[in-house]
Image: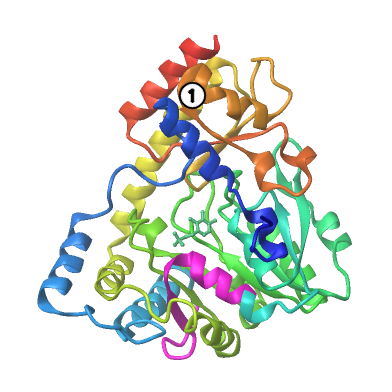
Amino acid sequence: MTSPLVPRMAEHTTSIFGEMSTLATQVGAINLGQGFPDTDGPHELKRIAMDAIEDGRGNQYPPPHGLPLLREAIAAHQERFYSLQVDPGPGVVVGTGASEVLQSALLALVDEGDEVVMFEPWFDIYGAGISLARGVRVGVPLSGPALRPDIDALRAAMTPRTKVLLLNSPHNPTGIVFTVDELRSIAQVAIEHDLIVISDEAYEHLWFAGHQHTPIATLPGMFDRTITVGSGGKSFSFTGWKVGWASGPADLIGAVRVVRQHLSFVSGGPFQYAMAAGLGLPDQYFAEFRADLSAKRDLLAGGLAELGFGVLMSQGTYFLTTDVGRFGYDDGLSFCRDLPDRAGVVAIPHQALCDDPAIGAPYVRWAFCKQPSVLHEALERLEKGLT
Ligand SMILES: *Cc1c(COP(=O)(O)O)cnc(C)c1O
């Protein structure tokens, strides 16, 4: 029987995360493939969600675009960290994770044949979102040994059909954080070509010493053309709660709202109370969160380097990138397919997150958002299995 699936989704049938996680379960491997922390976020936020359930707050449909309390907290957060003024009324929308907000934005803004430009490799749901919208994805490789955005290549990718620039910094999978200079150059291209920018800032609080996240919406001429997306799951280490949001000018957010209300209608009520409190946590929370993750990054990066991997030091996110080391592999995909059997560890090849396999072939993504004991164990297994 032929598949009933619409043809444009056929290429999205399997995901590399599913494939690798299945392998991991089959052989009992340590999963450094999937990006979720193995320790929960602040207990006080759990308490707030539990109290909300207990007290009957948010147990029935909350307002479609988010609890006013949470929308106000998002606006206050944008002002506090970035001096961005957003209107918590029409300028903010809450959804079921950053994922739903991103897909809603693509469905709201991209029409058949419209081109969406993004740096390659990319976060896997972008491709599916663009296909759902019947848009055309256009990849611009992150280039050179440091995997930086190439502005000339970005400019060369522009056509009369280019409508949206989909940005992600701190960047998954590479772990790079775009510099202000890079963002300025990107902004210039967006302004010259009158693009809408969807800026996926799911890792906005996860950057390490020497780097800092700057929302592109803070640059001159950019607020009015930018949808800035945040993830409560990533910022507060509750990825299972699925609360995300976008903020920006009322016309762009209004368009996202139109689509989003017809997808999940609303996002989990009790969790929204907890996320509102999370956004107001003191600076110390965010600093400690970064410090904790930074130590885990150093542990994994140091261990992998000792084993002979070339490590591209992560500047932010949960992830670091390496080459496939001196272990006899031509590319990351074959390395990652062998790794569970050889060493009992799972990682993700960049290749699976690129249209042009040549771009990602040399690289592998490793998640370090795991307890130190897990990272130590993974390193020991790699040492035994690979050397
Ligand atoms: C995890 C992630 C998301 C999705 O966030 P949710 O809030 O879990 O939906 C979006 N973008 C990037 C780059 C991510 O890594």
Q: Quadrant of the N terminus?
A: bottom right
Left or right: 98 as drawn, with respect to 145? left
What amino acid type should be assigned to the residue bearing mark 1? Gly
For residue 195, side relative to residue 371 (left or right): right
Asked if the stretch drawn in magenta spans residue 89, the answer is yes
Residue at horizontal 75 percent and vertical 76 percent from the top: 195
**Location of mark 1 (residue):** 302
Q: Residue at x 46, y 80 (%)?
A: 93
Q: Residue 110: image x %, image y %?
A: 70, 77
23, 83: nearer the viewer? 23
* Left or right of residue 24, residue 147 in this image: right
The quadrant of the image that shows the C terminus is top right
The residue depicted at 69 percent of the width and 15 percent of the height is: 328
Q: Quadrant of residue 321?
A: top right
Residue 315 seen in the current view: no
Q: Is mark 1 within 8 Å of ligand 1?
A: no
Residue 241 visible in the picture: yes
Quick check: is 320 in the magenta stretch? no
Look at the picture and state if 222 lies above or below 129. Answer: below
Q: Which element is circle 1 on?
A: helix
Q: As displayed, is residue 172 above or below residue 283?
A: above
- Magenta region, residue range: 84-106
